[in-house]
Each structure stands twice: as structure tokens, then as C-alpha cells.
Amino acid sequence: MSTPVNTSAAILALSKVAWRLSISLSNLISDAKPGHAALLNLTGEVGLLGNECYQIHLKLQEIANNTETGSPPPYDGDGRIWASLATQIHETSQTIQELESFEKGFRVEKREDSSLVSQPGQLGKNEDKIEEMENSVRRHSDNLRTTLLLIQTVLAHFVPSGVERTLRDDVAELVQMVKKLQRLSQTGPPWRHTQTEATLMQYAQEVIVKGTAAKEQSMVPDPMAGASTGEITETSDPPWTEVIVAIQKEQKEPESKDAIPKSTT
């Protein structure tokens, strides 16, 4: 079973690989005079991916340090959030390996053709591939960012002090991340949410509902007062629910092998 402890080292290693790859890609940019916009964007996204991985590592270390050895993963009784994170680490690692192969292959071409530096067209012919990899890296970063928000939000829900402020901010950012993923599916090239993203968004939906309800309860202690406040209630239908429904509808042919089932234990 995936836990904060056994996941922390894996995502830290992934962050280091991403940073090293970003540096290697930066060297390609300096070689490909006068520069290449697509490669520059890809390099930036890989660096940001490393940052997202490291932020999750820091959060996992914080959780591990506050968790007794041998105890179940905190803040997520059914383990879905940790299973989702483990799946994301695996998928992100595969993308990074593809990027490393691309970078190494490009360097081989460069050695075989000493005139490559003066031929920007060599990079131009790979522009579509570079943009495709950039989009993949960005999606991984968005998913990891959403996961970090989920961890922080669920953590805030179980901490009595300061819940209202932290929970309000994190729930709002979660909603924005869900909307961002939905917008990406409506612009640019044809694009479908992965099973990992669908599972992540489903969990986000549950956390948003729980967080919204907790925030309202802290704002209106009197149950009778809640009916006249005009606040959004747990039975309301806010705009973000439409986003979740749209994501679920996209899963016409879900692959059961990639699904992250909700544990019954």
C-alpha cells in the first residue's frame, strides 16, 4: 500500500531527474542558435515539474514526521490519494524517460552532423514532437499540483485551528485547478482526460463538497441560521459540479487496469 513515507523518496528522486533534464535541455537551447521557442517552453515546463515534485516531497516529509511508525496513512482513510499519487509518479517517470531518450537522441544527431548548430531546421522538424511532450509535462504538473492541494485541504479539514482560512483558500484553488483542466480539453488539439485525471477529479469533487460544508458550519454555528444565510449549501449545484460531470462523461471507455478503486478497508 502506498503511504507518505514510501512515496516521499520516489517523488524526490523524480524531482532531481526532472531538474537535471531541464539543465540538459537548456544546453540544447544554447546550441540551437538563435534559439527555439518550442524547446525553450519544454525546458521551462520540465523545470516546473521538478518544482511540483519537490513541493509534494516536502509535504510528505511533514506528514511522515508527524505520523507514528506503522500507523495507517493519515488524512485519507481509504488510501485513494496515496494510490493516485503513486500512479502519477509512475506515469510521470515514463514521460521523463521519453524526454531523456529524445535529449540523448538529439545529441547523437548533433555529434554525427557537426553542422547541426547552424541548421535550426533540425529542431524545426521535431517541433510537433516537442510541443506534444511539453503538453504532457504540463498535464503531469497540473495533476501533481491538484494532488498537493488535495493533501493540504484534507489535512486542513482535520485540524481544528485555522480550518476556515486554510480550507477556504485551498478549496477555492482546487476549484480553479478543476476548471483549468476542463478548459484545456476545450482548446487546442483534440484532448481527452486520462483515467488518472478522472479519478483525481472525482476525489477532488468529494473534498470540495466536504470542505465547503465544513466552511459553512464554521461560519454558521447555529443550524437554524444556516437556512437564512444565503450561503452555498451541500445540496446546491455550484458551477464546479458541471465541470466534474463533464470530465466523467469523457470517460466513455475507461480502462479498468488504470482505475484507482476505492478501498473497502
Image (tube, grey):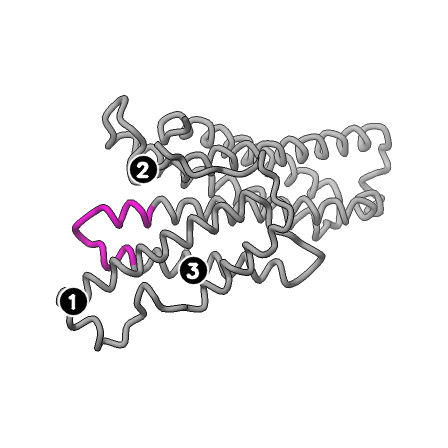
- The mark nearer the N terminus, 3 or 2, is 2
The local crowd at label 1, few if under 14, some if 14 to 19, many if 20 or more residues have their Cα within 10 Å, is few
Answer with left or right where residue 188 lies relative to residue 263. right
Q: Secondary structure at mark 1?
A: loop
**Front position in the image: 184 or 36:** 184
The local crowd at label 3, few if under 14, some if 14 to 19, many if 20 or more residues have their Cα within 10 Å, is many
Return the x and y of residue 188 as percentages of the image width and height.
Answer: 69, 60
The image quadrant of residue 133 is top right
Question: Which residue is situated farthest in the top direction here?
Answer: 70
Front disc: 3 or 2: 2
Determine if the magenta segment contains residue 139.
no
Identify the residue under disc 1.
223
Question: Which residue is situated farthest in the front direction here?
Answer: 264
Q: Considering the image in quadrants, where does the N terminus appear?
A: top left
User: Which residue is found at the position 51% from the left and 31% from the top?
Assistant: 14
Q: Secondary structure at mark 3?
A: helix
Identify the residue under disc 3.
175
The image quadrant of residue 119 is top right
Q: Is residue 223 above or below residue 5?
A: below
- The mark nearer the N terminus, 1 or 2, is 2
Amino acid of disc 3: Val
Amino acid of disc 1: Pro
- The residue segment tinted magenta is 152-167
Determine if the magenta segment contains residue 161.
yes
Answer with left or right where residue 43 lies relative to residue 147. right
Q: Is residue 98 above or below residue 33?
A: above
User: Which residue is found at the position 41% from the left and 41% from the top?
Assistant: 55
Distance Cα–Cα, label 3 vs label 2: 23 Å
Distance Cα–Cα, label 1 vs label 2: 28 Å
Q: Secondary structure at mark 2?
A: loop
Exactly how many numbered labels are in the figure?
A: 3
Answer with left or right where residue 84 lies relative to residue 29. left
